[in-house]
Amino acid sequence: MNLICLGLNHQSAPVELRERFAVPDGLLGDEGAKLTELNDVAEGVVISTCNRMEIYVAVEDLELGSKVLRNYLEETRGLDHASAEHFYEKHSVEAAQHLCRVVSGLDSMVLGETEIFGQVKQAYKQALDKGATKGVLNRLFQKSFGVGKKVRTQTDIQRGQTSVGSVAVDLAEKIFGKLKDCSVMMIGAGEMGRTTSQSFMSRGAKELFVTNRSLDKAVDLAGSLGGTAVAFDEWEDVLAKVDVVVSSTGAQHPVLLAEHVQKVRRKRKYKPLFLIDIAVPRDIDPATGEIEEVYLYDMDQLQELAADARERRLEQVRICDEIIKEEVEKMLG
């Protein structure tokens, strides 16, 4: 049995293309199960986060398996020649090493970030629950989680910026200075929303508002950080009094539009408004960034900020890669 990884990420594809191939969180297991219905595909796991969409499959024939996967994406997601150029494909040892790098945070926009570990575990669990994995992928993913823990405990790869949230806070501080007078609204109460909210509050933000389609989740997150929960149909009112909005929902279309900002500009006295879109598909209409006092950043722009920290930790990456190489050789040897 052979291993294939087919995917795209923040390095190979712009956010517009990643949106097109993104899979909603709750459907990852179903997607993995659908893969196993394809000719020559015995097992399948799909990972889809803000920065990547990757398919891992176990196949008998590499050439046939690759063709079957690409045909599947062509039929279901409109894969064409132009978009196919943004995909990478890895086989066997290279695919196993790539997964270990992903789980360890080495292939992330923010080097060493921790969110990806949990996201991959959740994607694997969904595939497992749907019966989409067997011996090959079970062994691979379980081994990758062990490698990820080893990398984090035996190296300094997590020193410095370790989450998208902390990068977003750095940006806010460049615009507003200290955050003690800043109010923040979080749209979405998932894991990304939680870690980003924690980053803002730990740096001294004055107040936090949390809104979510499920009010219970907003209440839970706001309560844990001393913030205020807001019903999802009332968040537009809060927009008039906050300085920062971070959006991370699972919506398939923009949640925050330019017209929402236009309505409250006068109430805000045209004060700077910092919008951070950490969702894929994007939550915030790009047109909002054209409003004079609005600063809009999406995942691709956050990547540029993370690049500086990445350069400083290249030596740690080398050490991590040696660990991964050794562990994969043990697994496949």
Image: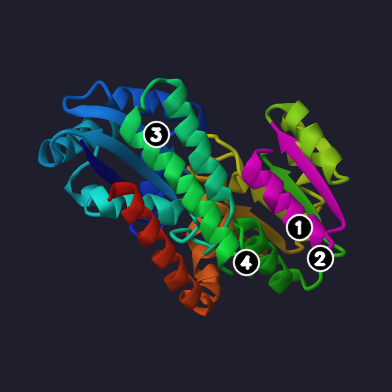
User: Does 38 sit left or right of 329 as displayed?
Assistant: left
Q: Which mark is nearer the camera, 1 or 4?
A: 4
Query: Is 235 on the left-hand or right-hand side of 156?
Result: right
Q: Number of callouts in the render?
A: 4
Point out which mark residue 161 bears.
4
Q: Nearer the viewer, mark 4 or mark 2?
A: 4
Rounded to the nearest whole Å, what is the CA distance between mark 2 and mark 1?
Answer: 8 Å
Q: Is residue 198 magenta?
A: yes
* Residue 88 is one of the magenta-drawn residues: no
Q: Give the mark nearest the N terminus, 1 or 3.
A: 3
Q: Earlier in the sequence, mark 1 or mark 4?
A: 4
121, 329: nearer the viewer:
329
The numbered mark at residue 138 is 3
Residue 200: image tag: 1
Relative to 90, 175 lies left or right: right
CB under 8 Å between callouts 1 and 3? no
Label 2 CA crowd tier, 10 Å (few <14, some 14–19, many 20+): many
- The disc placed on residue 179 is 2
Tell me how far mark 3 sits from mark 2, CA to CA.
45 Å
How dense is the environment of label 4, judged by Cα within 10 Å: few (below 14), some, or many (20 and up)?
some
Q: Identify which residue, 248 or 92, lies in the foreground.
A: 92
> Around disc 1, counting alpha carbons within 10 Å, would you say few (fewer than 14), some (14 to 19), or many (20 or more)?
many
Q: 232 or 95: which is nearer to us?
A: 95
**In the rendered structure, which amino acid carries the disc numbered 4?**
Gln
Which residues are drawn in magenta? 189-212
Residue contact at pointers 2 and 1, CB within 8 angstroms: yes
Residue 45, above or below 105: above
Question: Helix, strand, or loop for circle 4?
Answer: loop
Per the model, the C-alpha gap separating discs 4 and 2 is 18 Å
Q: Quadrant of residue 74?
A: top left
User: Helix, strand, or loop for circle 1?
Assistant: helix
